[in-house]
Image (cartoon, rainbow, N blue to C red):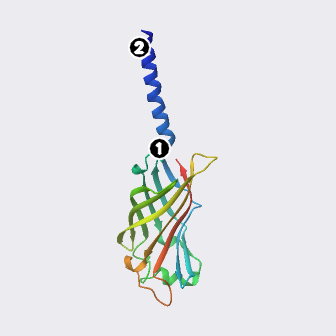
Amino acid sequence: MQINTLLKNTIYAGCLSVVCMSATYAKNWNLSPQSDVGFSINSLGLNVVQGEFEQFKASMQFDPQQPHKAATEFTMQVDSLALSKPSLRNMVMGEDLFHASRYATVNFKSTQFKPNGTNRYQVLGQLTLRGVTRPVVFDTVLTPDQNNPHILTVNSTTVIKRSDFGMKKAMAGVGEKVNIHLKGQWQAL
């Protein structure tokens, strides 16, 4: 009788610890509003223009023990774009580039997280810009905060060609390649 009770209690404790461990690691995350979601364009090795989306929504489902189940989704509001050179705003928002009057958002939805070393991942997904959807890969570092298990520091980058998304090709010395970045913190819900 005691062995049977001991066995039941052991199984119960084992199941409870698995559930608790899952609750500790499997998390839903939101990107902190203070994070930097933006881009830069270089030409001849010089930074020509930088932009930062001041309004965005981003969520992530991520468990470092099961990265194959991870997913993330972003939506950036084009009209919230702040530029390092405000004099370029009309050109950047115009039909040749973002065409903001027609395409209000830029979206990214992941399709796969591939581990690529300690805290490093290749996040594959679909980027939709100006109504054109193309595959992209973000090189991403997700670093757990040593003092707060509910925070992950993120640094994620990719490079696209703007003409691949229907934007006017390079002009007036401005580069064709756009460096997209995400720097900030994911906060557990």
Q: Residue furthest bottom?
A: 172
- Who's the residue at 45% across and 61% down the image? 74
Q: Is residue 101 left or right of residue 85?
A: left
How many other residues sit within 10 Å of disc 1, few (<14), some (14-19) or many (≥20)? some
Which is more N-terminal, label 2 or label 1? 2
Q: Residue furthest front?
A: 117
Q: Position of residue 85 (x, y in %)?
A: 59, 81
Q: Residue furthest top?
A: 1
Q: Position of residue 147 (x, y in %)?
A: 64, 46
Q: Please determine whether, in this image, residue 21 is positioned above or below residue 99.
A: above
As helix, strand or loop, the secondary structure at mark 1 comes to loop
Q: Which mark, residue 26? A: 1
How many other residues sit within 10 Å of disc 2, few (<14), some (14-19) or many (≥20)? few
Amino acid of disc 1: Ala
The image quadrant where one finds the N terminus is top left
As helix, strand or loop, the secondary structure at mark 2 comes to helix
Badge 2 is on which residue?
Answer: 4
Q: Please determine whether, in this image, residue 132 is positioned above or below residue 149.
A: below
- Who's the residue at 50% across and 60% down the image? 140
- Who's the residue at 43% across and 68% down the image? 106
Amino acid of disc 2: Asn
Q: CA distance from mark 1 to mark 2?
A: 33 Å
Q: Position of residue 156 (x, y in %)?
A: 51, 63
Q: Is residue 86 left or right of residue 115?
A: right
Q: Nearer the viewer, mark 1 or mark 2?
A: 2
Q: Please determine whether, in this image, residue 4 is positioned above or below residue 49.
A: above
Q: Nearer the viewer, residue 151 or 119?
A: 119
